[in-house]
Image (cartoon, rainbow, N blue to C red):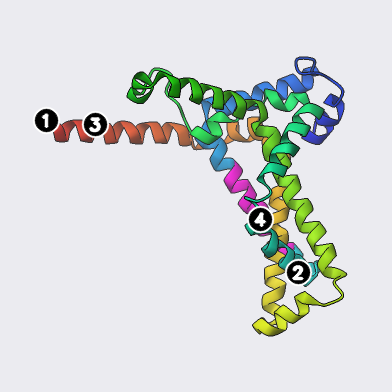
Amino acid sequence: YSFCTLLAGEGKRGSGMSSPATRHLIKGINRVTTEHPLSCIGYLFGARMMIFSLGSMTLGSAGILPAQFAMAFAVTRPLKRIRFPLDMAGGIALSKAFPVLTEIKVTNLITGPQDPNAPESPVFTRYPNLKEYWEKSNEYINQYGAAYLFARDFVGLASVVLTTLLLTHDPFSVTEQLVEWSGVSNDTMSTMTALSGGACLSTVATPALVASLPTAVDKLVANIDLDMAYKLKMEEIEKKASDAKK
């Protein structure tokens, strides 16, 4: 099943009332993000870069996007922090519409690999309240993290599209004037437009990439286990530090 198809069937279900196919998928996503967080991060980064590259080349060859799209992309990027409340509101609304998203645990993708046998941080020992706040923040991240990520991408894409429409129907021809004033060539503008389109395509693909995590990461780990490599490297560093103290 595609992720969107599963969500369409889960919209009217409550959390804990998911279909067997959805439960299996969520369980698989949580398994790989817990056991192989670095491999998940590596796969998501690599897959998005590949989509960005292929999308940019395809859109550049087709030439179907107007110059206003690149301008809209450049204008909306600095506004990411300003629209944070809108992203949060979208994430909460999405989690209410599709409660199954709250079951996806994304903490490990943010904090990286955690050793359950590691001693408690001395900071938490000294400041118990800080530990309580940390655990509470992780709970909120897990509850709304996936919904927020998807909503943020959707809001970002919608802002680019709406800004493109506004610039396309701009009676003052702001885009043309800026291009003429800056002296940017048509080839450079076409390249910028294609790169902007590729970036948006990689953003749109995020839900599908998250849905493919169990299958893709299992295959990746069978060949290159980034988490095991990280663990061995950290053990090597700790051994060298221990030998240096002796």
Q: Which mark is residue 79?
A: 4
Residue found at x 72% / y 54%: 200
Can the viewer see residue 186 in this picture? no
Label 3: how many residues lie within 10 Å, few (<14), some (14-19) or many (20+)? few
Separation of marks 4 and 1 at Cα, in angstroms: 53 Å
Q: Earlier in the sequence, mark 3 or mark 1?
A: 3
Distance from the alpha carbon under mark 2 to that under mark 3 = 53 Å
**Residue at x 82%, y 58% (from the top left corner):** 162
Q: Residues within 10 Å of mark 4 (few under 14, many from 20)?
A: few
Q: Per the image, is 149 magenta?
A: no
In the image, what residue type sits under mark 4?
Answer: Leu
The type of residue carrying mark 2 is Ser
Residue 32 image position (x, y, % from top left): 58, 27
Q: Is residue 244 left or right of residue 209?
A: left
Q: Which residue is mark 2?
A: 61
SS of the residue at dot 2? helix
Residue 87 drawn above or below residue 127: below
Measured Cα–Cα span from mark 4 to mark 2: 29 Å
